[in-house]
Amino acid sequence: MDITTEQLSAGMQYQLQIYFAGTQNVKPQLPVSFEELEQKASEVMKPEAFAYIAGSAGSEITTYNNKEAFNHWQIIPRMMGDVSQRSIVIELFGMQLPTPVLLAPVGVLSIAHPEAEVAVARAAKNLRVPQIVSTVSSKTIEEIGSVHGDHPHWFQLYWGRNNDFTRSIINRAEKAGYTAIVVTLDTRLFAWRERDIKNAYLPFLYNEGLANYFTDPVFLAEVGDPARNKMETMMHFANCFSNPSSTWNDLAVIRECTKLPVIVKGIQHANDAKKSIDHGADGIIVSNHGGRQLDGAIGAIDTLAGICDEVSDKTTILFDSGIRRGADVFKAMALGAKAVLVGRPYAYGLALAGEQGVKEVIANLLADVDLTMGLAGCNSWKDVTRDKLHHRN
Ligand SMILES: Cc1cc2nc3c(=O)[nH]c(=O)nc-3n(C[C@H](O)[C@H](O)[C@H](O)COP(=O)(O)O)c2cc1C
Ligand SMILES: CCCCC(=O)C(=O)O
């Protein structure tokens, strides 16, 4: 009997296409492993741009902890269930999505590729994966939004002291079709990042990541011509970008400006998860910003179980920081996440091969997710439960 492609799982079909191409001497364009991908990106990118993306806070132990903590959780596979009809579909805020992966907000992407977030948007739309667009994107929220059209795309807000700017930018995101607002809480201060300090490199000072500010009526009304006085422009940017004096009650400002779901990013403690809910957030992203903010912090996945235990019946929980492979996605979902975000891997794909590079990196991850689910003996995320994991003390 011939095996039809319908009988093969998505992950296996994808993998077989790669092996068949190998018989014609066609090899995948990009390295498959994250470690080699990162190495290859370091060879083609400007050193200071690569350092900005790869780098983390201080000694970079938090990024190490993120990776290491995944090994605290080990998958216990089950045999001989029928896993031929698997599905990695999820439901998120009333939306059906074909996969549990979203593209994390990564700012200043023009330092990786001239097409920046627009190339990412094309890849995301093609793969039907939502993109979360940063306030400090290199292309405007309108340009990126117009690539997506009806395809889901969310806006990530850097929330500063200037409430008029906050209202203006949320309003622009709504008009450009974004369907959720992610408010990042862990970047109210900009971390001590040793690689960038050594290189004396901050992309914003080269106007990277300022597209949304330089096209915003509130920002422009205050600054006038941004080229006129660079120092003054940067002070206004800092004012709009962050506010270290804000407290939970201030979340009301954002809650009042939009009817879209508000999701707070950067939660690491169950009590903060509860506070987010009490102050009107519709969801949380358990994240330590990929280790880029607080040096010496706990590996992000190690905080997920406790947070899910406390609030998973009250809110929607997403996870990021260190997701590199299918097994990482499986573990986060088994611990209680409803979806995961991926950051650096797609930024490297972009740096190496633009839109095609992002597509390849994410398609590889999704095939790996599908195969991991099947190999663990699961058919859907309903089967991916905590008892499929062993915690190695
Ligand atoms: C170069 C770079 C820029 C980032 N910019 C933003 C940003 O603008 N807003 C934000 O909320 N998070 C930002 N992040 C953090 C990501 O959204 C995400 O939390 C992190 O990258 C996840 O970890 P991972 O890179 O290990 O996948 C950035 C991360 C990187 C690597
Ligand atoms: C000032 C930080 C903006 C981009 C960002 O979030 C990051 O580099 O991690």
Image: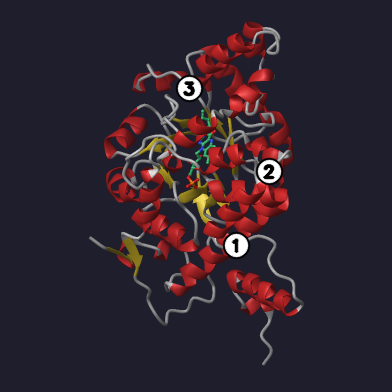
Q: Is residue 51 above or below residue 349?
A: above
Q: In the figure, residue 332 lies in which quadrant?
A: bottom left
Q: Position of residue 151 (x, y in %)?
A: 67, 44
Precedes in sequence: disc 2 or disc 3: 2
> Mark 2 CB in 8 Å range of ligand 1?
no
Q: Residue at x 36, y 46 (%)?
A: 300
Q: Do the residues bearing badges 2 and 1 touch, measured as CB atoms within 8 Å? A: no
Along the line of sight, the residue nearer the viewer: 258 or 131: 131
- Find disc 1 in the rendering and name its residue: 364
Residue 254: mark in rendering = 3
- Provide the secondary structure element on which disc 1 rests: helix
Which element carries disc 3, helix, strand or loop?
A: helix
Q: Which residue, as the protein is rendered here, is positioned at the far bottom?
A: 1
Across the whole image, how many numbered discs are drawn on residues? 3
Tell me what residue is drawn at x 52 percent, y 21 percent: 241
Q: Nearer the viewer, mark 2 or mark 1?
A: 1
Q: CA distance from mark 2 to mark 3?
A: 25 Å
Image x and y of residue 141, in percent: 66, 30
Quadrant location, the N terminus: bottom right
In the figure, is residue 215 to the left or right of 53?
A: right
Local packing at callout 2 (Cα closer than 10 Å; few below 14, some 14-19, many 20+) is: many
| Residue highlighted by disc 2 | 121
What is the CA distance from the residue labelled 2 to the residue labelled 1? Answer: 18 Å
Q: What label does residue 189 carry, if any? A: none
Compare marks 2 and 1 and give the one earlier in the sequence. 2
Q: Position of residue 148 (x, y in %)?
A: 70, 41
